[in-house]
Amino acid sequence: MLLLSPLLIPLVASLLSTFVSGLARQAVNLFSSGLLFASACTLLLQVADHGRQSLALGAWPLPYAIEFVADGLSAIMILLVALVSLAVSIYQIGWKESPEHSGLYSLQHALIAASMAVLLAADLFNLYVWFELMLVALLGLLTLGGGWRHNEAAFKYFTLSMLGTLLMLASVGLIHGSTGQLNFDALAQVSRDPSLGPALTVYIGMLLAALLLKVGAFPLFAWLPASYHTLPAPLLALVGGLLTKISIYVLFRLTGQVFDIGMLREALGWLAVVTMVSGVLGAAYHWDLRRILAFHIVSQIGYLLLGLALASPAGGAATGFFLLHNILVKTNLFLIAGLMWASMGHYDLRKGGGLYPAKPLLAALFLLSAFSLVGVPPSSGFWGKFLLLQETFAQERFVWGGIALATGLLTLYSMSKIWQECFWKVHPGTLSPLSPPKTAYVAVITLSVVILFIGLYPDPVINYLQEHTTDFWRDNS
Amino acid sequence: MNLVLIIAVSLSVSAGVWLLLSRDNFRILVGLAILGSAVNLIIFLGGRPGTLIPPVISMDAEILAQGAASPLPQALVLTAIVIGFALLCFGLVLGARLSRAHGHADVTRQHASEPLAGSSDDPYKPKVMD
């Protein structure tokens, strides 16, 4: 039951939110996020003590039952999703960007439930179903605004995501057709059977392509900066911080444990560096704070894909660390962007300014997260990039490593652009007299403390990940 | 049977991709619907279509008879159809609202979420050019 609690708690909260209104709905939101965080902590402790937890649903023996599994990697991912969801719930108390829609919390918790289920699923078809539910919940959230731009953003997101899920479904059907299995453990054994021939590689390639569309890799990332920025600030933080990273987690598990992607690794590596560069260039020439950060999601996805392309146990631990750091930093930056908007009255950098003298605390919080995203030592991003590049150069992939370093410089450029335009420059008009709610600062400071802690004491996290990703890419080492 | 299915799949995939490349909201949606049907047929292909042995385990056996139809892909197709149908309905409503708001269904002329360069809220123009 503990294993399913990260899925059941938000699901119940999603249902409950439709029955209550006003303050009670806010209370459900906060209480369920708190409960979710507590259950995620318990699950992590249990996995750390007793190892992998698994639950087979349906009265069939494995591998035919529908299996949910929490191992070291999924447990820590669940903890992070719960932490981010708690921070966003705290941030939402008193956040008034647009009139609150009655379906908001219901869809938000449905999205969290679906993300948790994706992290727990150990079955290809189950994975596909929860991916679809993530898509449904996010489409609902995108259209809640009700304006033209919301509907347009939802349509763009719908078209490309639907294409991705159809590709995913087709590849799941083909993989099942040729191996007869859907369960991850069973597939890990069956798919290495040489008698299946090269067709299976094509099907796995299709699955990878579908997931690459979902993570926002080059060249199919256009949906991401086209849709995310229409969401209100707390939702943008939740969606921008989590969704693409959850798809990366799925890629991580599938390429590391389940399938042997063989020669596709080389292609993945080149795709990773092109994604890195195109994302950061998009960020460099935009002026809207949200769209700059949305392009940075794409760029950071490139680093994560690079870690997967390295396909070694050391690369696995590095990717895991980068993934955790990225979820925290990205969410925090989007939350800070919301606070900056509340003070400046605008997301457009050209029309903003004057925040440094007016809001020194906000400036400090932004600097911490921005430096972490860039990878300035001793921030969490530094350790993530350090581990990743160490492994890249150890494998003598000098071009990939060089491009990753150059991308870091361009990230610094676009972060200093935000700093200069929003914090240093004198505001062209007057700063908004409204002060953002204190609770929003509580959420941002909590996440910042975690980021700072991981940056100063990375050892426990790195050791944990090294211990729990030892069976990733076993065959390659 | 397999040959018929394969021809059906390739025809619907080509029709779906052709419609998806169009610039009209509704053609894109119809393209996705056709592509969805093609994908369902692909899964269906994995269930040994054409066999006349039903997927029922007889009393004296533990496993399915050799060459019997596989019931799992049919269950998967059913789930996929339900999800696909719900999403398609949502997409059609979205498309209808968009084309009504704009007065046309041309996606290349819908720029509310991503303003073009040169418009009043140009997203790219540097400050020095003001």
Image (cartoon, coloured by chain):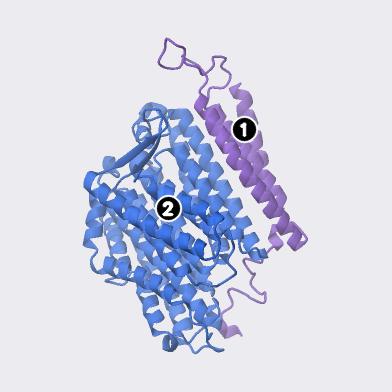
Chain A, colour shown: blue
- The quadrant of the rendering that contains the C terminus of chain A is top left
Give the residue at mark 1.
B9
Q: Is residue A433 above or below residue B102?
A: below
Seen as rendered, the residue at the extreme top is: B60
Q: Chain of mark 2?
A: A
How crowded pointer 2 is (Cα within 10 Å; few <14, some 14-19, many 20+) is rated as many
Classify mark 1: helix, strand or loop: helix
Residue A76 % position (x, y): 32, 53
- How many numbered marks have been drawn onto this rendered protein structure? 2
Classify mark 2: helix, strand or loop: helix
Residue B40 % position (x, y): 58, 34
- Residue at x 48% of width, y 37% of height: A172
How crowded pointer 1 is (Cα within 10 Å; few <14, some 14-19, many 20+) is rated as many
Q: Is residue A95 left or right of residue A51?
A: right
The chain assigned the colour purple in the figure is B
Q: Is residue B15 left or right of residue A101?
A: right
Query: Can the viewer see residue A266?
Result: no
**Label 1 close to label 2 by CB (< 8 Å):** no
Seen as rendered, the residue at the extreme right is: B103
Could you tell me how far apart the alpha carbons at marks 1 and 2 are, in whole angstroms? 31 Å
- The quadrant of the rendering that contains the N terminus of chain A is top left
Q: Is residue A115 above or below residue A129?
A: below
The residue closer to the viewer here, A389 or A14, is: A14
Q: Chain of mark 1?
A: B
Q: Are marks 1 and 2 on the same chain?
A: no
Q: Amino acid at mark 1?
A: Val
Q: Which mark is residue A246?
A: 2
Q: Is residue A134 above or below residue A150?
A: above
Residue A255 % position (x, y): 37, 44
- Residue at x 42% of width, y 51% of height: A9
